[in-house]
Amino acid sequence: MMKIKKGIQLIDQHDKNYMYGGKFGGNYIPETLKKPIDDLTKLFAKLRKDKNFLKERDYHFKNYIGAPTPFIKLENLTEHLGGAQIYAKVVSEANGGAHKIYNATVHCLIAKRAGKKYIVGDTGAGYAGKMLSMAAKKFGLKCKIFMGAKDIKRQRPNVEAMKKNGAQIVPVITGSQTLVDAVSECMRYWVSNCDEVHQCIGSTVGPNIFIKICAWSTAQISRELIKQVKEEFGKIPDKLKLINCVGGGSSAAGFWNEFMNTHAQFIGVEAGGPKNSKLHAAPLTNGSKIGILHGAAQYVIQDKEGQIGSTDSISAGLDYPGISPLHCFLKDTKRARYTSASDEEALKAYRLVSKLENISPSLEPSHAFAEAIKLAPKLKSSEIIIVNSCGDSLKDKDIIKQKLGSYIR
């Protein structure tokens, strides 16, 4: 059975071949990408220890992103459900409305250190693209965003924001026209232009270095949270549950990182898709097999021939057939438990939370709230649930109006 090494950050749990537990991750890349991947790996290893770079990162996290984001008790939701006390880490209060801003900012800082003037990225829900366009504008970089044609239609507010920030949006019309295809096209573009262009993968997926940069960046969430929890309770509560939605897995990796060596329970919630459909975006909770996707070994939804299978989710940010190797590792070591919520459950959770509390979660964290709503009444009042409200619902207003008839913000 796989084991987690104590005292070592989650992103560094891999072996010399960049494999987590000997099964997940790695660098399954074409020969043309070996040198740029190696160069970026070496550069990031230096920057992680560079006091000036860390000082610059922290400055921008505070003064540009707005760290720390709020940690609040959801009094009304707690009273309504009974049982456990429910809190939220409101990461959606970060500049731009979601956790993706941490990764985007760090990548732009790395691009500047590498002497690159162009940055390219992928996006599904539009938040990774929006944040990258924001950060690129701030740091004087030219920006290109690859986005599935289906997602361009359903995430219109973020598309408009990207255009406003001066980014070029490249519609991806191949395959399912969603996030998986956007990542593929983005990587193909980088292969041909890596001498001049820096790539930012929007989640903890892809070759190992991109997983590490993303999770290292979003770890800011748990660096803040562990301090806030200790201030609120005087210690880390004995029965603490940290619930996070999981698609590519960036917000969950960041939310859990500083709690790795504590007794806190991690619960990841994947996209279960429409209630009466066989399609979903939940490889960890549906017995998916290990496959190679975007340069890394992971549990991935596949068809009978072993090809990447079709997915479906109301949430564009969770609509991905694979899952970060970090989460595959956490599942197999039993450090985290994974479940799923359907489209309908996520919509109901959005409506209840937005009605009772002064937050309006996007459809991604609404999946996590759906699990909290199911779980809380079964627990004692001495138990604590914290949900990562990692995105704001503004981008989903058209979908929500269509499905529920009204939008609460």
Image: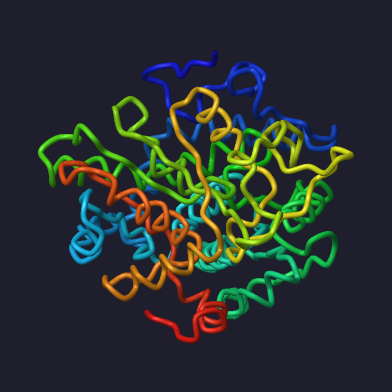
- Residue 7 falls in image quadrant: top left
Q: Residue furthest top?
A: 1
Q: Nearer the viewer, residue 26 or 269?
A: 269
Residue 345 position, x and y percent, is 48, 62
Residue 271 position, x and y percent, is 57, 54
Q: Name the quadrant of the N terminus.
A: top right
Residue 295 position, x and y percent, is 74, 37
Q: Residue furthest left?
A: 234
Q: How many marks?
A: 0
Q: Nearer the viewer, residue 110 or 83?
A: 83
Relative to 178, say whether 167 is above or below: below
Tell me if 395 is positioned left or right of 57 in this view: right
Relative to 407, say whether 303 is above or below: above
Tell me if 35 is positioned left or right of 85 in this view: right
Q: Nearer the viewer, residue 134 or 153?
A: 153
Relative to 66, say whether 213 is above or below: above
Q: Name the quadrant of the C terminus.
A: bottom left
Relative to 295, say whether 74 is above or below: below
Q: Residue furthest right?
A: 305
Q: Nearer the viewer, residue 403 or 38?
A: 403
Task: Give the residue at x 78% y 42%.
Answer: 302
Task: Give the residue at x 25% y 59%.
Answer: 81
Q: How is the image coloured?
A: rainbow
Task: Give the residue at x 46% y 29%.
Answer: 10
